[in-house]
Amino acid sequence: MTIRVLVVDDHLPVRLGLTMIINSVDDLEVVGEAANGEQALRLAQTLRPDVVLMDIRMPGLDGIATTRRMCVLGVTNILLTTAFDADEYLFGALRAGAAGFILKDTDADSLIAALRSVASGGGVLSPSVTRRLIADYVTRISPSEAREQQAKVLEPLTAREQEVLACVGRGLSNRQIATKLGLAENTAKTHVSRVLAKLRLNSRVQAAILAQELDLV
């Protein structure tokens, strides 16, 4: 099965480079290119790509606003790219529903792996910034706020689903969750889907950040 990718970046050389890398792999195909958020929304609605690879910083409609609108359209497999290892827009983009982000200097093999992961429902955070991202996010709330939020947010989840959420927070795959909790892989996948649905999250990355915020990890 070929993974259909929409590439969004306001710099033509970058778009061409990404397109060349993606089209060089048998199971990936660029089905459209956009230079800004408005174009990306139109193409996402008509093409329904499996993954959107999009720059987080663009003139006009930026990556955050575009991600939020795409999620409303049902396009949620969005992988953002950034040239910086710390970005003021990053938290907003993940909250908007992006499946993750990678740095623009990521090598071709890692880019391809990230696209495949997002297409299969996984989340991707660039290793070089993951710890800084989570640490900075967690420090934004006080301990008392965290406890209150934890009780409120976890209320809809069963005990097993809370365990699954903690595993997602550790970055475990469905297979790893199944092994850790003694479940069948399909059962673990079902639990993850239920957690996302109950908490109204669009991606595993959002779930992972929430687990860190609630101090489940």
Image (cartoon, rainbow, N blue to C red):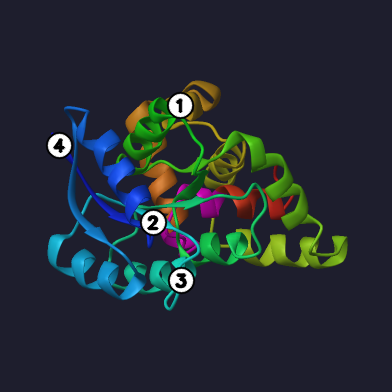
Q: Report whether 20 appears left or right of 125.
A: left
Q: Residue furthest front?
A: 13
Label 2 vs label 4, nearer the camera = 2
Labels 3 & 2 near each other (Cβ < 8 A) = no
Q: Magenta part of the protein: which range?
A: 197-207
Nearest the eye: 97 or 172: 97
**Residue 128 appears in which quarter of the rendering?**
top right
Q: Give the labeled residue for mark 1.
A: 178
Q: CA distance from mark 1 to mark 3?
A: 38 Å
- Residue 160: percent from the left, percent from the top? 54, 41
Question: Which residue in the structure is indicated by mark 3?
Answer: 62
Residue bearing mark 2 = 54
Label located before the other in sequence (3 or 2) = 2
Label 1 close to label 3 by CB (< 8 Å): no
Calculate the distance from the C-alpha at mark 2 to the C-alpha at mark 4.
Answer: 19 Å
Task: Give, as a three-letter code, the residue at label 4.
Answer: Thr
Packing grade of label 2 (10 A; few <14, some 14-19, many >=20) is many
Residue 187 to residue 202: above or below: above
Q: What is the secondary structure assignment of the residue under circle 3?
A: loop
Label 3, residues with CA under 10 Å away: few <14, some 14-19, many ≥20: some
Distance in Å between CA atoms under marks 2 and 1: 32 Å
- Tell me the residue at 32%/32% (across/down): 186
The residue type indicated by label 1 comes to Ala
First reached walking from the N terminus: tag 2 or tag 1: 2
Residue 158 visible from this viewpoint: no
| Residue 130 in the image, given as x and y percentages of width and height | 65, 41
Q: Three-letter amino acid code at disc 3?
A: Asp
What residue sits right under mark 4 in the picture?
2
